[in-house]
Amino acid sequence: MKKTVLGIKIDDLTIDQSVEIALNWLSKRRKSSISPFYITTPNPEIVMMAQKDKELKNILNNADLSVPDGMGLKLSGHIESLTPGVDLMEQIIKRSVDYSFTIGLLGGWLGIAEKAAERLRKKYPGVKIVYT
């Protein structure tokens, strides 16, 4: 369910619901030429930054899925679920093995994506990380 916290739209979904939505999109995208989608994981600090940054606010409010990442959002009284972005990413990667999806890791300091890929390959044998 879409809710608003300080003008930022957030999907008040559990991690399991969020994973299912993302996997459904990925499955459909593989079978057709639907447009790309993006997921944001706003936490209280990001919501506060968006109060002063119109571009950030626009990015957050136009996300296909915007999951609540931070206890402060739950404490606001508007959000019931918590879906930490790192946990969502890991669950999608874990399930990617079942769907034969390929994964790319982007960002972080020099060498961090490669180190993350190494650890994810050990943790989830069969994961296909094609670039870092």
Image (cartoon, rainbow, N blue to C red):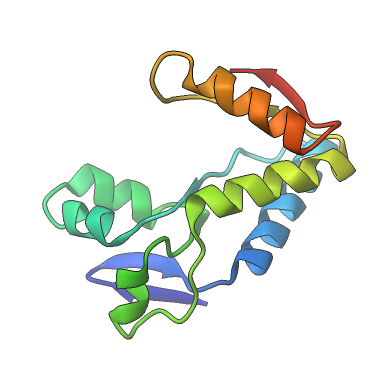
Q: Quadrant of residue 30?
A: top right
In this picture, residue 46 sits left or right of residue 64: left
Compared to 31, does 128 lie above or below?
above
Q: Is residue 102 visible?
A: no
In the image, residue 25 lies at what x, y percent? 71, 50
Task: Determine the residue located farthest toward the left in the rendered image.
Answer: 52
Apparent side of residue 69 relative to residue 77 in the rendered image (left or right): right
Q: Residue at x 59, y 53 (%)?
A: 88
The foreground one among 68 and 84 is: 84
Numbered label tally: 0
The quadrant of the rendering that contains the C terminus is top right
Residue at the image point whose x is 52% and y is 77% from the top: 1
The image position of residue 67, as x and y in percent, is: 48, 61
**Residue that sits furthest to the bottom in the current view:** 77
In front of the other: 102 or 115: 115
Is any part of residue 130 visible from this angle?
yes
Q: Residue furthest top?
A: 110
Query: Residue 51 versus residue 119: which sits nearer the camera?
Result: 119
Quadrant of residue 115 within the rendered picture: top right
**Residue 24 location, x and y as percent?**
76, 54
- For the point 69% across and 29% down, the residue is 103
- Image coordinates of residue 36 in percent, x first then y, are 60, 38
Q: In the image, what residue occupies the spot 26% across and 45% down?
A: 56
Q: Say left or right for 18 vs 66.
A: right
* Relative vertical location of residue 92 with respect to residue 14 in this rendering, above or below: above
Q: Is residue 80 above or below residue 56?
A: below
Q: Is residue 74 left or right of residue 24?
A: left
